Every structure is written in structure tokens, then in C-alpha cells.
């Protein structure tokens, strides 16, 4: 049975399915801002179910840019509500006849130029991808500018701190030099005083000779 025939059989499920709560549960694994690379209807290799495969391409954070994240929505009684929720969030219009879904998905992915925020959550060997919503690009640019400004402030603060450390080291070196100079002067002074005392005191032999003459 081909994909179109399977889609015809899924028609009733689609019409009866309620819309699940959009966005899913927020988790800490990671949030990413993405483009939609592709959307297609395919048959699962593991359980042969009919499903929609959506491929997201990461644009932020920058260190993950270019990596792809896959989301699979089963066109089954359990999976339909989640696919409907994603379609609503993305602004994807589903054709009244699901047999036309493959073409609708391909056209949508090719013409979609927005940014989507997703959350990736891994549990055991399963990876769940939640579509949180579309990103306001203007607000996102403002956020990037704020982050750049914060980075500049941090770098400036770090540079200033390094400069203060260098100045403190220079002051310590100056103090050490002053102490060494003072100590050298003190030693020289004590040595000079000791030499003068020795010159003023008559030699022991001369004193003994004077005593003998008396």
C-alpha cells in the first residue's frame, strides 16, 4: 500500500483528532532556534507507521549552527493531536484531503523563512522535540545586541582588572626596591659608625706602654 492510500485511510483519524496543547513541556536539555530544512511524509522503518518527518536546522546557539534535529509525528490516533499542534504553531495549513499532504509539506518547507524555537529533551534512548513557537526576529536581534553589550562590558571589566593587577604588582616592586634601598643605607650607616668608633679608641698596646712608663 502506497503513502497516498495510507493517507486516505488516515483521513478519518485526522478529522476526529483534537489539537494537543502546543509547545509541550519545557525541559532543560536545550533550547535551539532553527530554520525548517524539510518536511515529508514517510513510513517508519521500525514500526511501519505513517509519519511526518520534520528536519530543523540549528542557527543558534552559534556553536551548534548547521546541525540538524529531527522530529517525527505519527499520523496515528495518538500522534495526530501533536502534529495538529505543531501545524498550528508553525502556521501550516493542512489540506482537507490528506492525500495532498506530501505536496503541502514540501511547499511549506521551501517557502518558510521564519525562525522556530524548539526544545530537545532526551530520555533513555528516545529524543523528544517540542516546538515552542515562532521567534520574533526583531526581539531576537535586540537580545543579541544586549548579549554583545554584556560581552563587551565583561571584556572591559576583565581588561581593567588585569590593568589594576599589573599596577599593584608595579607598586609592590617599587615598595620592595624602596625597602632594599633603605636597608642598604641603614647597613652603610651602621658600618660607618662602627668604623668611626674604632678610630677613636686607642689601640690596646699603646695604652699598655703608657702604663709601664709610669
Image: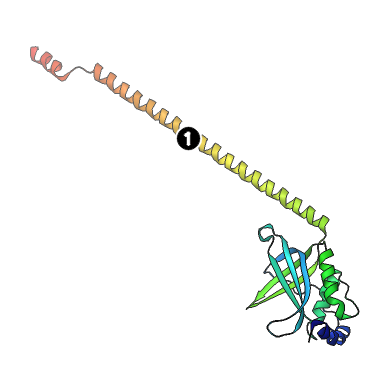
Tell me the quadrant of the picture where the N terminus can be found: bottom right
Q: Is residue 127 visible?
A: yes
Task: Using the image, determine if residue 96 lies above or below residue 139.
Answer: below
Question: In the displayed structure, would residue 205 be above or below residue 47?
Answer: above
Where residue 6 sits in the image (x, y, percent)? 81, 85
Q: Residue furthest left?
A: 212
Residue, disc 1:
173
Q: Quadrant of residue 59?
A: bottom right
Locate residue 198, reporting x and y percent. 24, 20
State the SS at label 1: helix
Above or below — where is 92 with respect to 19?
Answer: above
Q: In the image, is 96 to the left or to the right of 118? A: right
Which quarter of the picture shows residue 162?
A: top right
Quadrant occupied by the C terminus: top left
Q: Residue at x 78, y 69 (%)?
A: 132
Q: Residue at x 76, y 72 (%)?
A: 54
How far across and how far down the image is residue 113, in percent? 82, 61
Of residues 103 and 74, the one drawn nearer to the viewer in this rendering: 103
Is there any visible trace of residue 87 in the rendered image? no
Residue at coordinates 42% horizontally, 28% vertically from top-left?
A: 181
Amino acid at each position: 500500500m502506497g503513502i497516498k492510500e495510507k493517507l486516505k485511510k488516515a483521513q478519518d483519524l485526522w478529522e476526529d483528532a483534537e489539537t494537543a496543547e502546543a509547545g509541550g513541556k519545557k525541559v532543560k536539555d536545550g533550547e535551539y532556534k532553527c530554520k525548517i530544512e524539510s518536511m515529508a511524509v514517510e513510513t517508519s522503518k521500525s514500526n511501519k507507521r505513517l509519519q511526518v518527518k520534520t528536519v530543523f536546522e540549528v542557527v543558534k546557539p552559534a556553536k551548534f549552527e548547521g546541525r540538524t534535529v529531527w522530529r517525527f509525528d505519527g499520523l496515528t490516533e495518538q500522534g495526530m493531536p501533536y502534529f495538529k499542534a505543531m501545524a498550528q504553531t508553525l502556521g501550516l495549513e493542512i489540506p482537507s484531503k490528506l492525500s495532498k499532504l506530501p505536496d503541502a509539506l514540501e511547499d511549506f518547507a521551501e517557502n518558510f523563512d521564519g525562525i522556530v524555537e524548539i526544545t530537545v529533551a532526551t530520555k533513555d534512548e528516545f529524543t523528544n522535540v517540542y516546538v515552542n513557537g515562532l521567534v520574533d526576529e526583531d526581539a531576537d536581534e535586540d537580545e543579541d545586541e544586549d548579549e554583545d553589550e554584556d560581552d563587551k562590558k565583561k571584556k572591559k571589566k576583565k581588561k581593567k582588572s588585569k590593568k589594576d593587577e599589573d599596577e599593584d604588582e608595579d607598586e609592590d616592586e617599587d615598595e620592595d626596591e624602596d625597602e632594599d634601598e633603605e636597608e642598604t643605607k641603614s647597613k652603610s650607616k651602621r658600618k660607618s659608625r662602627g668604623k668611626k668608633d674604632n678610630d677613636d679608641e686607642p689601640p690596646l698596646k699603646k695604652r699598655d706602654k703608657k702604663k709601664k712608663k709610669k
